[in-house]
Image (tube, rainbow, N blue to C red):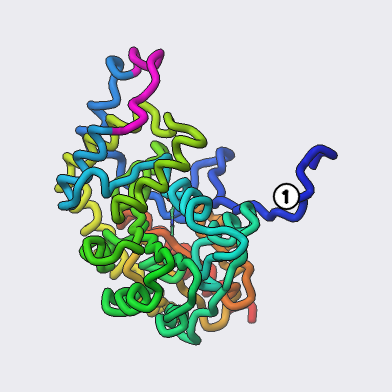
Amino acid sequence: MSRFLSARLSDLEAYTPGEQPRDKKYIKLNTNESPFPPSPEVIAAVNADEVSRLNLYSDPTCKLLREKLAARYGVESDQVFVSNGSDDILNFSFMAFCDKEKGMAYPDISYGFYKVFAALHGIPSRVIPLKEDFSVSADDYLSLGMNIVIANPNAPTGLTLSLCEIRNILDTNRDSVVIIDEAYVDFGGESALSLVPEYDNLLVVRTFSKSRSLAGARLGFAFGNKELIADLELIKYSTNPYDINRLTQVAGCAAIDSDSYYFDNVNIIMENRDYITAELEAMGFEVLPSKANFVFARHSNVDGGELYTALRENGILVRHFTGERIKDFLRITIGTLDEMKALAASLKNIIADKENKA
Ligand SMILES: *Cc1c(COP(=O)(O)O)cnc(C)c1O
C-alpha cells in the first residue's frame, strides 16, 4: 500500500479469485469454468475481420447483442443490460441502488464479491446466516427495508430457492431492489425472469461465463424493468461506455445463436454431476444437492484443507474456503467425465492413505 491510498480504502479486503496457475497442467476444477470450448460459431465469429476493426471503438449501446438477448429471452431490449462480466453488473447495482442509508442484505455464505462491493462503496451490509442445512432462509428476507442480493442457485452450496420464495421476498420488499444472481441457473435452477414484468424492483443477473463457455471473454447480462436498466446504464456511461470490446460483442451474439451446442454441454455436466455425487457419497462424503456446475462436499473424517492440498499435489485443483462454517468442504467444479473419473480415483487413494496411517 502506498502512502497515497485513500484512507477510506485502507482496510479494504479484495476478492480472492480462484487460482489460474501456469506452472503445470492441472485438472482445473476450482473456478466453475466450463470444460468445453466456445461453440464453433463463436470461434468462427471472432475472426481476423473483426480483429482488423479493433482500431475503432466498440458499440457502446451493444445494440445487436441486446436485441438478440431480448429476442432469445422474450423481453424488450430496454429491459436488457450487458456488461463486462456479471461482476460489473453487481458492482454497478451496489453503486446505483445503495448508499449509507440504504444498505444491502445477503447470505453469510454466498458469492464473496457481495461483501467486497459493500466495503468498496462504504455501504452497510446485513449478513444473514444460512440455515443449519446451508439453505437460504427466505423468511429472513421478508420486509427487510434494504436492498437484497441472493445467488440462486447459491454459491458455493449449489442449493436453490423456489420461485415462490423469491416472489414472497419481492412482495414484502417493494421499495427495495432484489437482485437474483443467476450465474448457475442453466444447470437446473428455476429462473426469476418470468417475474420481471410483475416487479419493478427485480433485477435478474446472468453470465456467459459458466454455461456458455465464455469466462475469458467477460460478458454478463441482466433483465429488469426498463427504469432499473436505465439506472445501470447511468453508471456504465459514468465509468466506461465501451466496457464490452468488439470481440466479446461478436462472441456473445454467436453464442446466443448456439443454444443447442451449449444445452448439450449443460446436459453432459448435469450427468457428470450425478456421477461424481454418487462416487463421492460412496467414499464417505456428504454432498449438498447441487443445481449448479459444481458440488459442495465434506468428508466424514478427512479435513477439507488436507484434501485440497493432496489433490493439488496430484495435479487436481479444487476450491477450499477457510470460513468457519465451511472449512470442512471442497467446492468441486463439474468437468468432463474423464476429469471426474480422475478426481474420484485420486480421492480414493488419498482417503485410503489417510485411513491406513490412522
Ligand atoms: C461466476 C459468478 C459470477 C461472475 O461471473 P462473471 O460474469 O464471470 O463476472 C457472478 N456471480 C456468481 C454467483 C458467480 O459464481
Magenta stretch in the rendered image: 51-62
Report x, y in % for residue 275: 30, 68
| Residue 27 visible in rendering | no
Where's the C terminus, which quadrant? Answer: bottom right
Report x, y in % for residue 224: 30, 55
> Which residue corresponds to mark 1?
9
- Residue 354 lies in the magenta-colored region: no
| Residue 235 visible in rendering | yes
Where's the N terminus, which quadrant? Answer: top right
Give the farthest residue toward the right: 3
Viewed as shown, does residue 25 lie left or right of 197?
right
Picture residue at 51% right of the left edge, 36% below the top: 239
Residue type marked 1:
Leu
Q: Is residue 72 above or below residue 111?
A: above
Picture residue at 75% right of the left edge, 55% below the top: 11
Report x, y in % for residue 254: 22, 35
Towards the viewer: 69 or 75: 75
Report x, y in % for residue 279: 36, 73
Picture residue at 23% right of the left edge, 66% below the top: 198
Label 1 residue SS: helix
Viewed as shown, does residue 278 lie left or right of 92?
left
Viewed as shown, does residue 250 lie left or right of 21?
left
Q: Is residue 294 above or below residue 22?
A: below
